[in-house]
Amino acid sequence: MKTNPCIEQSEQNILHTYNRFPVVFEKGDGVYLYDVEGRKYLDFAAGIAVNALGYNHPSFTRALQEQSQKLIHISNLYYNVPMIEAGSRILGISGMDKVFFTNSGTEAIEGALKAAKKYASSRDGRAGHSIIAMNHSFHGRSVGALSVTGTPAYREPFEPLMSGVKFADFNDFDSVIALMDDSVCAIIVEPIQGEGGIYPASPEFLQNLRKLCDEKDILLIFDEIQCGMGRTGYYFAWQEYGVKPDIMTCAKALGCGFPVGAFLLNAKAASSSLVPGDHGSTYGGNPLACAAVSQVIDIFEQENLTGHVRELTPYLEEQLDKLAESFPFIKARRGKGFMQGLVLEDIPVGQIISRALENQLLVISAGGNVLRLVPPLVIEKEQIDEMAEKLRDSLAGN
């Protein structure tokens, strides 16, 4: 196959909602992707932080094959064994009490918002509650998720959206306090803002949010869709902070390429929120998706991937810091674990991404001027060295 005819056919048939890069991928193996013309690319984008296991992981693909030969879908009118097992596994690694499986991250956000609103209406005997979200946050593209996404350019073409959303400044607790009133039912925050520019929350900010939610009997929602599932060296980023949410959303690496998400609740939120008839999903929790979830967690445990990320993070940060020292237009490096960003100034981030693609390295952007690196969690030192060399060439314009 040739690249150009494939791209031309795609542009004819597929709604143009993405400005795609001029490459057509055919297969992957380990941490590498191969295009239709046989070129090999080192992947430090991982399908936007999805492919934690890389590509063609043998036990993962085998688990999907085996489950597809048994049962793919029966609906939520019946129990199924993979969902029961996956539920037990994800509660075990998260310490939460209940889980609802969805098809995507944005659906997980929708469920979390509904649970928070239902909790407050059950408590107060009325509806009309509001939610505090963060400026520069990103929670998804559906109406509810977009309503709590703190970037006006994403929201404005689709307004009016869900009412009753107020935006505070990330890492600024005083700005949260200024928005508090009796209508607020929840605060939603990413422990690490991803699309917003790879900004980790400060420990004090999350601690203060937890204390405030406890005092006001409102729910704290953590969006762990991108920063969760091992990316920071912990199953979930909040576990390093030691601040536990009432509701947590998860997706992306939860299925390592298979489309699945979840929202999880603690006992307080679960016991006084959603009941039969309040929420549902035709495909959510289907046996094939849940087999993927269980196998992902099995592999994480067998290969100690969270420990692997913690072990290699200092080396990854060291190599990125060397690049930052070498190029004056790199103003900062920030992030946690394998969720890192290089802040660029006076040079378009898209230019560097395109150069990197020419050098057969995949990186992506965040927050307008940040070069984002979110590689598969299975990378080794040699791939970090290879990335650093290719990225150095790209930054130098070679």
Image (tube, rainbow, N blue to C red):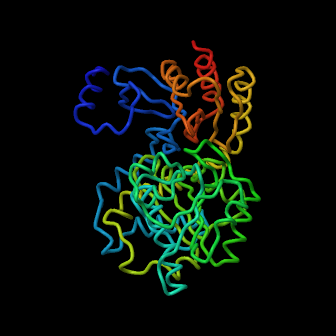
Tell me if 218 is positioned left or right of 361 in this view.
right
Q: Quadrant of the image for the N terminus?
A: top left
Residue nearest the viewer, comparing 123 with 72? 123
Residue nearest the viewer, comparing 166 with 61? 166
Look at 70% across and 20% down and name the residue there: 327
Dividing the picture into quadrants, the one containing residue 268 is bottom right
Residue 188 position in % (x across, y down): 58, 62
77 lies above or below 72? below
Look at 73% across and 20% down and name the residue there: 326
Number of callouts: 0
Residue 158 position in % (x across, y down): 38, 53
Q: Quadrant of the image for the C terminus?
A: top right
Kindly give the residue lying farthest to the top in the view shown. Answer: 398
Dividing the picture into quadrants, the one containing residue 334 is top right
Tell me if 271 is positioned left or right of 160 in this view.
right
Kindly give the residue lying farthest to the bottom in the view shown. Answer: 125
Residue 256 position in % (x across, y down): 47, 48
Look at 45% across and 33% down and name the residue there: 29
Residue nearest the viewer, comparing 226 with 30? 226
Tell me if 344 is positioned left or right of 77 in this view.
right
